[in-house]
Amino acid sequence: MSKRKHIKVLISVIGLDGHFTGAQIVSRFLMDAGMEVVYLGIYQTPEMIVNAAIQESVDLIGISSHASNYEQIGVLLDLMKKNDLHDIPVICGGTIPKQHAEALIKRGVSKIFPPQSTSESIINYIVSVVKR
Amino acid sequence: MKRQTDYGYDIKPVYTPKDIADLNYERDVGDPGSYPFVRGYYPNGYRDRIWTRRMTAGLGSSKRTNEVLKQYRKMGQTQGMLVIHDRPSAMPIDADHPVARREAGVLGWHGSSLVEFEELMDGIPLTGQSITLLGSSAMSCMRLAYIVALAEKRGVALTEVHGSVTEYPFCHTFGQTDHLPLDLLIKLWLDSSEYIIRNKIHMRCGILSQHFQESGGNNAQALAIEIAQLKELLGLLVNERGLDFNDVCLLPYELVSIGSRFFEEIAKVRALRRMYAKMARETFHAKTEKACQLLISVHTSGRTMTYQQPYNNIARCAIQTLAGALAGCTAIDNACLDNAYAEPSAFAARMSLNTQHIVSDETGVTDVTDPLAGSYFVEFLTNKVEEEAYKILQQIENQGGMIAAVKKGYIHNMMEESARKKQKEIESGERLIVGVNELVIPPEEDDDIPIQSVEASDSEEIAIRMENWRKTRDMPLLNEKIRQLFDDTKKDGNYNLMPSIIEAVKAYGTAGEIMGVIRMAQGFPYDPLEMIYCPFDL
Amino acid sequence: MINSIVKKIVNGDPRDVARLIRDIDDRVPGTRDILKALHKHTGKAYIIGITGAPGVGKSTVVDQMIRGLRTNGKTVGVLAVDPTSPFSGGAILGDRIRMQRHSLDEGVFIRSLATRGQFGGLTQSTRSIIDVLDAMGKDYIIVETVGVGQDEVDIARSAHTTIIVAVPGMGDHIQAIKAGIFEIGDIFVINKADRPDAQKMLDDLQAMIDIAYKKFKKESWKPPILLAEAVNNKGIVELLNEIEKHRKSRRSLSRQAIIGHKKALARFELIDMIKSRLVEETLKRITNSHEFREYLDCIIDGTMDPYSACDDLISAKLNFFGDGNSG
């Protein structure tokens, strides 16, 4: 990863979750931090997100989650393993209860950002995990 | 800290008679039960009729939601039930759709067919309580069809059933799931509303105005939009469908969001009654006093319920419930302590029902009608929010009315701008929210609350059931009914689709199938997500 | 190594294609050698450029074009170019949203690209990426760019058919088209044609085309104007038909004219390639030199003005072309 000058991330909302505001705000501040953001918007199935990540060859996937549909994120993680996308970390943000957050981390999400996480903390995390 | 209403009026430290010098009690306020109904519709207020104290239900399968409803009845919720659809059936796609498989029942009841409605209502009466089924607008015609079909099966007279099954067609403008174009949503809404009015069914249309405010709109805007959409929708029923306003007026049922700005929220509801009464008389030439009354239900604001320190939400919910009670309303359903996390857990549901009963039974606010009338500040605020709302209403009219304003993006921009402003005020500390930007604690010290959730296996179970059940239906009959619906949809836009939808529902057509066929007849893909194809030969 | 990558690309493996595109975009050393080896596998795809101001609905038009082409059994590659923020160097690549329904279709490969504000480098890397999509066997390659700036115009120019999209009711649009990109349009699409001013816009545009056509009579193709509502898939079949017509008209040109066209395009592209390579190499030489750093300090100290620094650096470093150290 270190040979890359630019960080390219994919930001999406998953499944039938219609809350796009968070994803848009995050996309915006990642752009302002110099990243290239492939923004997919809402109603994306795990399959659509994985294919987009492959075609766009992104460094990281961010999922904004506000609708309790954590199984969709689980399926996304399974699909990524199936497609050998081990080198692409998945991060999540949103109103995810602790219990579910812990389960998602166990399933392979690399980091979860609760509401009111600062933009700095998200940017710093992405930079550190992508440049590693 | 900002001392300003959420629509930007600077609040003075003290209000005196001078602030309402122009107020004429008879003309502008009136006694409870008389025009312009600022003080409510009943001369003796809640002594005549206490508000319906209810909780939203809906999670997982029909059987599971049925158990929850029965549990709520045991908790004392016997005046009325309120069930909310899950996202797939609100769209609608059926449980065995590839996307729905992981979401069926996640945030509500998965009701996609008559068989599921039958299970939902198993052991629960259709009469003697109000039946409120919530979801997106396109599903109104489906919900109405379920009720008509089940009433027929049970041998219950339709005129005995009351409640609300229709939702207004602007849901998707304010961030609700819906995949039909606005024009078709409005057509289907007009169809179900017209069917209700012509058949004298005691069903209401819930105008879910809460969504505008919940998406960040301010009180004056919310008020203007409530009036603008009522004016346009009721106008369409009168002018396009040829109905009499004195019948149409029995349809709307306004769901209003009540946030934490206590007096402002109360003023908004009082002003709403006055503005509606004036519109009914001046625009629609209402003949009776009854026709000038708008049924108002209160939803405590989900937007104000924080993810951080969730127990604080119990206090917020109580304050908002009190505001709703003082403002005067016909029903309250609560967004409660776990609103930022999931659908209400049993604990949260009990807390919020208890909160309503504490307000209604312990505080004494139900003893007297509209106790805030005559308060210099409250009467002033009522006038002020009305004045601001009329200005915004004029702007919406200048756009060509609510539908035109939505299509032009005017309403959306207004909402976004207001939401941005509110967000900025929180970030800058001008508005304080405990747990968010005041008295903050580290996340690891935060309280754990019980979380209601649906297991992935539950969604899959609903899907498998749907898949297998589909095959057991009388296919020739269903094909015939679907064909009829398809042909009817191609007819003139004012041709009412309700009869053919009811027939298709009785033949156990699913929401995905019925709406899919309507979509196709209108030139849209069968599946809103374009992943599956129409199984019927049309 | 190179051969195995080339083989995978030609076989159309989306992951290798995607990775190579990323390497081209990031200018990873060694990528040129792969492109050299890949070149003989290119030249089969039909390239369509589509351009227009932000908000005219280009992505929606592209989405519907993909749908139409797929219905006809054709495979499609899409390259959607979005501007990089000049302030942060970041970008939001949002064109894909409108086309995501095709993301599960193996016959479609969609790629977003940020302009990154390089010195003419965008046209260069875009052409290389088009070559990659061509080599992977896509029948059609659609390149979507925002119709502002020379780079975007150049990209559109190198397509076989260039479509310009506009919408009525935005006042200055005729003006905007006139200013830079009008001349390169083979087909004009007035999108969102349900808007009230559509007919007026069509008339204005037609008048402009008539004048231009009179001036350059030798051109055998007169650009058509189509009315479309891409959101409702209206006007897209007609658009695809016009593209085919244009494709045939190109084929029906005299042999001499075809060679002339090809030569002009090849010349244009080669010059562009040399230009960007030169700028890149020269800049690297100059900015890596100790003189550059010294002059920079002098400018900051105020002992030298930037104009003199520029002149001195160029005259001191320009003779490096002859020196044997270049690698």
Image (tube, coloured by chain):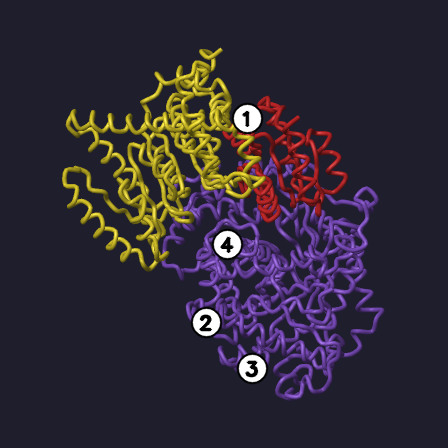
Q: Earlier in the sequence, mark 3 or mark 2?
A: 2
Q: Position of residue B443 (x, y in %)?
A: 79, 44
Letter of the chain in purple: B
* Image: B363 above or below B447: below
Q: Which residue is mark 3?
A: B288
* Few, some or many residues within 10 Å of mark 4 (<14, 14–19, 20+): many
Q: Position of residue B134 (x, y in %)?
A: 61, 56
Q: Residue at x 37, y 56 (%)?
A: C170
As drawn, is B422 to the left or to the right of B367?
left
* Image: C247 above or below B352: above
* Closer to the camera in the image, C210 or C292: C292
Q: Residue at x 43, y 67 (%)?
A: B400
User: Same subunit under labels 2 and 4?
Assistant: yes
Q: Residue at x 52, y 61 (%)?
A: B411
For disc 1, the chain is C
Measure how far apart labels 1 and 4 are at the Cα level.
84 Å
Q: Amino acid at mark 2?
A: Val
Measure how far apart labels 3 and 2 are at the Cα level.
16 Å
Measure how far apart labels 4 and 3 are at the Cα level.
33 Å
* Image: B372 above or below B317: below
* Few, some or many residues within 10 Å of mark 1 (<14, 14–19, 20+): few
Q: Which mark is residue C290?
A: 1
Q: Amino acid at mark 4?
A: Ile
Measure how far apart labels 3 and 1 are at the Cα level.
91 Å
Q: Amino acid at mark 1?
A: His
Q: Amino acid at mark 3?
A: Thr
Nearer the camera: disc 2 or disc 4: 2
Q: Which residue is mark 4?
A: B502
Colour of chain C as rendered: yellow
Q: Which residue is mark 2?
A: B238
Q: Earlier in the sequence, mark 2 or mark 4?
A: 2
Colour of chain A as rendered: red
